[in-house]
Amino acid sequence: MTNSANSDIARLCKEHGLRLTGARKIIMQVLLKSNDHPDAVELHRRVSKIDSRVAIATVYRTLNMLRDKGVLERHTFADGRARYETTDNEHHDHLINVETGDVVEFRSDEIERLQEEIARAHGFEIVNHRLEIYVRPLEKPQRRAGRAKA
Amino acid sequence: MTNSANSDIARLCKEHGLRLTGARKIIMQVLLKSNDHPDAVELHRRVSKIDSRVAIATVYRTLNMLRDKGVLERHTFADGRARYETTDNEHHDHLINVETGDVVEFRSDEIERLQEEIARAHGFEIVNHRLEIYVRPLEKPQRRAGRAKA
DNA sequence: CTCCAATTGCGTCGCAATCGCAATAACGCC
DNA sequence: GGCGTTATTGCGATTGCGACGCAATTGGAG
Ligand SMILES: [Mn+2]
Ligand SMILES: [Mn+2]
Ligand SMILES: [Zn+2]
Ligand SMILES: [Zn+2]
């Protein structure tokens, strides 16, 4: 798996005319294997475990480059810090558990369609959009006469 | 109109146990008459025109207070700066014209309902949400063979 | 009018992200 | 494999938004 990831990274760099540098290799490798939505500091932490010489400025620069190239996406959730994920083929939006910070992805073709409709109705076309739903776990429905909670 | 606005402000302060200070009067007055979505710096600019002694720190503090009291809402659009608007009775979301920065408000009960449904399906209840649609004006459909644009 | 806590202005700080610059390292070429 | 060019990096300093500490000011209750 590391092999195919490595060749992916080499291909990506070649395609975009970028030098395949040590820092770049590690940062992209870390990104590709992350399936959560880490911020720059967290990415730097993970990168540092592999090579502690990589500076956070390089992480930021690499993230910006890859975003410009369309390789990854940057989200800014309510906490204000930017979070990153590799661009997957299908668009999705996010549910954010406000108690744990966990992120759940979802996609609603209905909502996507309605947005198009709304933009159209106002004389616009959509460039992009952002839908974040901040949620908390539902109370487990007590089976019969649970005692009142707190 | 200034009269009713003034009494609104006095009432708001009394209701929340706040002193009706000079800075507060001006800041709230400016907020109430703004129907766009200004950021703190822009609000400070508008406030300064009325009384140049008001510090931006006071603007920030007042905005935070009023947000805590539920009098106004803070949005953070893609540019990263926080923008404010007085809370109106009905929730709405935003269309943002990426070319001009203009903000258009809309409300879709359909989308609101679908969000509830999605959250529920994942075992969550919604705390709040954020939907921003970044748009650009539709090309005017040329009536017959208009010359190509630019 | 007096008194005191709430509020303000000012300067400073914190944090995420960016930038300038000298040192380093890819990589095309031989 | 070495060379030279130049993109890239690490480091430290800087920016920009927003918050904070504190002494001075000021509402407003009595
Ligand atoms: Mn995602
Ligand atoms: Mn609005
Ligand atoms: Zn979407
Ligand atoms: Zn909504």
Image (cartoon, coloured by chain):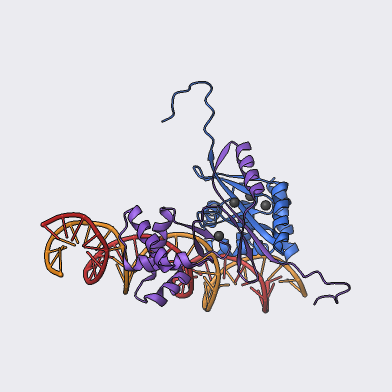
Chain colours: A purple, B blue, C red, D orange
Classify the position of the N terminus of chain A by image quarter.
bottom left
Which of the two residues, A1 or A100, is positioned nearer the viewer here? A1
Q: Position of residue A84 (x, y in %)?
A: 49, 62
Q: Is residue A47 visible?
A: yes
Q: Position of residue B59 (x, y in %)?
A: 57, 61
Classify the position of the C terminus of chain A by image quarter.
bottom right
Q: Position of residue B37 (x, y in %)?
A: 58, 50
Q: Residue at x 31, y 65 (%)?
A: A21
Which of the two residues, B125 or B39, is positioned nearer the viewer here? B125
Picture quadrant where residue A12 is located: bottom left
Q: Residue furthest right?
A: A145
Q: Position of residue B97 (x, y in %)?
A: 54, 43
Q: How many marks?
A: 0
> Horizontal placement of A9 versus D21: left or right?
left
For residue A117, above or below residue C4 = above
> Horizontal placement of B28 versus A42: left or right?
right
* Ligand 1 occupies quarter: bottom right
Which of the two residues, A86 or B26, is positioned nearer the viewer here? A86
Q: Is residue A57 visible?
A: no
> Horizontal placement of B59 versus D14: left or right?
right
For residue D17, above or below residue A124 = below
Which of the two residues, B90 or A99, is positioned nearer the viewer here? A99
